[in-house]
Image (cartoon, rainbow, N blue to C red):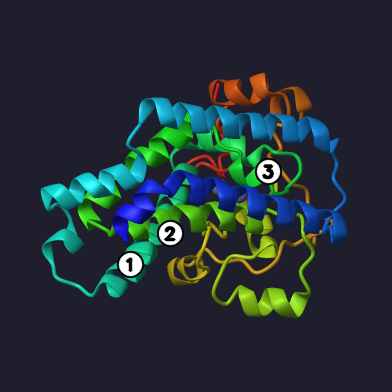
Amino acid sequence: MDELIASHEATIRLGSFLGVFALMALLEILAPRRTPTQPRANRWLSNIGLVVLNTSLLRVIFPVAAVGVAEYAQLSQWGLFNQVEAHPGVALVVSVIVLDMAIYLQHVMFHAVPLLWRLHRVHHADLDFDVTTGARFHPVEILLSMLIKFAVIVLLGPPLAAVVVFEVLLNAMAMFNHSNVRLPLALDGILRRAIVTPDMHRVHHSHLADETNSNFGFNLSVWDRLFGTYLAQPVAGHTGMVIGIDTFRDPAHCVKLSGILLMPFTGKVTDYAINRRWNTRDEN
Ligand SMILES: [Zn+2]
Ligand SMILES: [Zn+2]
């Protein structure tokens, strides 16, 4: 099973990415939630350009990827599930849940620490919110996330299948919960008891600091409820809310790929980092 998954990993990932992307893009046309504020072509060119850049960088810098680290941990008998005998199904489910909690905590950390927020601002500075926003991350954030994931895998010793299932799920869910799709409110209410819906995650992309510092989850909605960061709806409503960051509104920074890549190195850290949110002092 593990060998089969490891040898077909690339095909599984690419197939699910293209399938979910096409489905969400189609639903965004059929049932949009908001009217875009920017021409779609410009944003998509940059956001998809980032995906291509990040995927290539990961392949070059970490040729073994997360599943390779899980394989190495297995051979070396590192991590919980390589030390403790557990039913394969239990190990798989628990591993996926633990990886999801780790990614939630990592996301909170990227908001709280000013230096990390500089990187994560790239995700939040998108002026609209759609399926491509889900993959819009600065390459350095992508590399750091991968290192954190490696560390969690070494400690957890998950089955290889759990790593592939988690990565495919995370990818698919990120495209789903960033999509500009209008789900029936009743369906949204039922779904968000278990998973993060587009309306739930859109709150996180508000320009208001207290809304941005809410709803950090990517897959399961339980982490925000459990850790106290859940916020049901944006104060201005989903069609009235402003998406993005107040200090980055110029498309030259937020839409152009060169501006996006340079964003961590420009401007002050304001608003969202933990010790800057209520700062009324003059910093000069
Ligand atoms: Zn965030
Ligand atoms: Zn997001």
Q: Position of residue 258 (x, y in %)?
A: 65, 19
Q: Residue at x 48, y 71 (%)?
A: 222
- Nearer-N-terminus badge (3/2): 3
Residue drawn at (68%, 39%) of the image:
245
x 47%, y 49%: residue: 107
Secondary structure beneath label 2: helix
Distance from the alpha carbon under mark 3 to that under mark 2: 21 Å
Q: Position of residue 249 (x, y in %)?
A: 75, 32
Nearest-to-viewer mark from 3 and 2: 2
Closer to us: 202 or 42: 42
Mark with earlier residue (3, 1): 1
Query: Which residue, given by chain and number where applicable, does mark 3 sit on?
Result: 132
Say if mark 2 contacts mark 1, CB within 8 Å: yes
Name the N-terminal-most of marks 2 and 1. 1
Q: Which residue is mark 1?
A: 92
Is residue 49 shown above or below 33?
A: above
Query: Residue 165 bears which disc, if any?
Result: 2
- Name which residue type carries label 2: Val
Element type at mark 3: loop
- Seen in the picture, residue 173 relative to 232 is either above or below; the reply is above
Q: Which residue is at 26% across, 71% downward? A: 88
Q: Amino acid at mark 3?
A: Thr
Q: Position of residue 168 (x, y in %)?
A: 49, 54
Is 84 on the left or on the right of 183, as rendered? left
